[in-house]
Image (tube, helix red, strand yellow):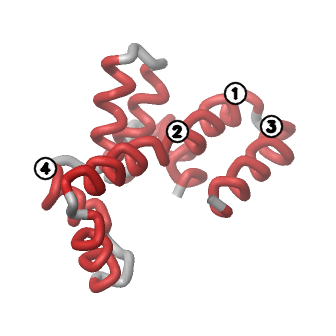
């Protein structure tokens, strides 16, 4: 939660003055990126696998969480979130940004700046 607060503070207090268009893409992405994780978390609790999942990510020193998500859900939380946003007809640039979070090196050039700031 603290990281989300810091991201929001950065975007609203600095980036908004420097590049308003960029901040208008970053703010919703920064706030919504956690939604996929929240949905996955609720699913793990419902399935009774929350502790098992937590033990795996702890054993992996909280690195490469997307790989562990793939093991459980066959999709990572970023890609899952992009599916939700596409279904809900969100802005295409937000969808593309979230889809590119896992593999920023594959992103189209105009999204790379956004992705670097989100990471």
Q: CA distance from mark 1 to mark 2?
A: 18 Å
**Residue bearing the label numbered 1:** 21
Q: Residues within 10 Å of mark 4 (few under 14, many from 20)?
A: few
Tell me the tag on residue 65.
none
The mark that comes first in sequence, 3 or 4, is 3
For residue 52, what is the image quadrant?
A: bottom left
Helix, strand or loop at label 1? It is helix
Closest to the observer: 83 or 40? 40
Tell me the tag on residue 32.
2
The mark that comes first in sequence, 1 or 3, is 3
The residue located at (29%, 29%) in the rendering is: 83
Extreme-top residue of the structure: 89
Q: Residues within 10 Å of mark 3 (few under 14, many from 20)?
A: some
Dots 1 and 2: beta carbons under 8 Å? Answer: no
**Residue bearing the label numbered 3:** 16
Relative image position of residue 4 (x, y in whole percent): 64, 54
Picture layout, residue 7 above or below residue 64: above
**Residue bearing the label numbered 4:** 74
Q: CA distance from mark 1 to mark 4?
A: 34 Å
Q: CA distance from mark 1 to mark 3?
A: 8 Å
Helix, strand or loop at label 3? It is helix
Which is more foreground, mark 3 or mark 4?
A: 4
Q: Is residue 18 left or right of residue 98?
A: right
Relative image position of residue 36 (x, y in whole percent): 38, 44
Closest to the observer: 14 or 6? 6
Which is more foreground, mark 1 or mark 4?
A: 4
Which is more foreground, mark 3 or mark 2?
A: 2
Q: CA distance from mark 3 to mark 4?
A: 37 Å
The residue located at (39%, 37%) in the rendering is: 108
């Amino acid at each position: 939660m603290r990281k989300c607060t810091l991201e929001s503070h950065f975007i609203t207090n600095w980036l908004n003055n420097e590049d308003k268009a960029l901040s208008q893409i970053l703010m919703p992405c920064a706030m919504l990126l956690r939604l996929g994780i929240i949905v996955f978390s609720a699913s793990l609790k419902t399935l009774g696998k929350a502790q098992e999942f937590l033990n795996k990510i702890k054993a992996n020193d909280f690195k490469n969480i997307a790989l562990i998500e793939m093991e459980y859900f066959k999709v990572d939380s970023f890609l899952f979130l992009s599916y939700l946003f596409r279904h809900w007809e969100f802005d295409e640039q937000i969808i593309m940004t979230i889809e590119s979070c896992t593999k920023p090196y594959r992103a189209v050039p105009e999204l790379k700046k956004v992705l670097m700031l989100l990471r």
